[in-house]
Image (cartoon, rainbow, N blue to C red):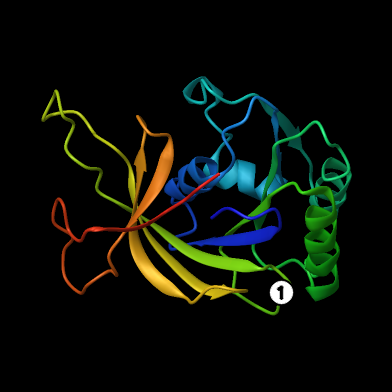
Amino acid sequence: MQRHTLSEAFSATATDAGIAGFVLSYSPQADAPILWVQDRLSQRETGRPYLPGLSRKSVIRVDVSRAADVLWAIEEGLRCKALSCVIAEIWGDPPALNFTATKRLAIRAEASAIPCWLIRRAAAPDLSAARDRWRIASLPSLPHPDDPQAPGAPRWRAELFRARGQPPGTWVATYDRAADRVDFAAPFRDGPVATGDGTAERRAAR
């Protein structure tokens, strides 16, 4: 279940765009807008969010230069009750993103009841106050039900390696557009992931 707190998502490779899709799919599906903040390196290396693909979401984008500015924008956003979620991208391991900074964000998110995600690329999972910490890698999409040549529902290898109040684990996560939810399949096994691998074990509720 998506909680109103601070979560971190680390990408398997620095330029894997799928991590943004996972975070966005896992975020609340509400009418209220999302605040999306990027630092300069994240935007340069991975590009901006593709807003035309977010038909059900209103996004307020903020571009800043430094990680310290990203943290300031996040904290200010979490003061705004009109937002449904705050998503921020920070490249690498800047000194400004220390345990104290993440503790402030976690407390602010929980006080405001607004989920906050930090997307971390080219970063190490150092000490953090984030309540949930994920490693995300893109997987081949499911077959399209109407066109075998077209991509179907997106999938990710999702590893929850630290969490408060729930056990860690690794799953194959799939976004179900019809139900507007993320489904987590049975624990990931060694070897290639075949279509239909595993059975539904848990779902992301909002």
Q: Residue furthest left?
A: 148
- Name the residue located 33 percent from the left edge and 42 percent from the top edge: 154
SS of the residue under disc 1: loop
Q: Residue furthest bottom?
A: 127
- Image side of residue 68 versus residue 32, left or right: right
- Name the residue located 77 percent from the left edge and 49 percent from the top edge: 113
Residue 131 percent location from the top left of the image = 66, 68
> In the rendered image, which residue does mark 1 sit on?
128
Badge 1 density bin: few <14, some 14–19, many ≥20, Cα 10 Å:
some
- Image side of residue 118 versus residue 186, left or right: right
- Image side of residue 144 versus residue 94, left or right: left
Residue 63 percent location from the top left of the image = 75, 37
Residue 168 percent location from the top left of the image = 47, 76
- Name the residue located 64 percent from the left edge and 64 percent from the top edge: 92
- Name the residue located 21 percent from the left edge and 42 percent from the top edge: 142
Residue 26 percent location from the top left of the image = 51, 46
Please tell me whether residue 79 is drawn above or below residue 156 in the rendered image: above
Residue 149 versus residue 173: which sits nearer the camera?
A: 173
Residue 18 versus residue 66: which sits nearer the camera?
A: 18
Q: Quadrant of the C terminus?
A: top right
Specify whether residue 67 is in view. no
Residue 51 versus residue 58: which sits nearer the camera?
A: 58
Quarter holding residue 129: bottom right
Specify whether residue 182 is in view. yes
Please tell me whether residue 106 is drawn above or below residue 4 in the rendered image: below
Residue 79 versus residue 76: which sits nearer the camera?
A: 79
Amino acid under label 1? Answer: Ser
- Image side of residue 96 versus residue 19, left or right: right
Quarter holding residue 91: bottom right
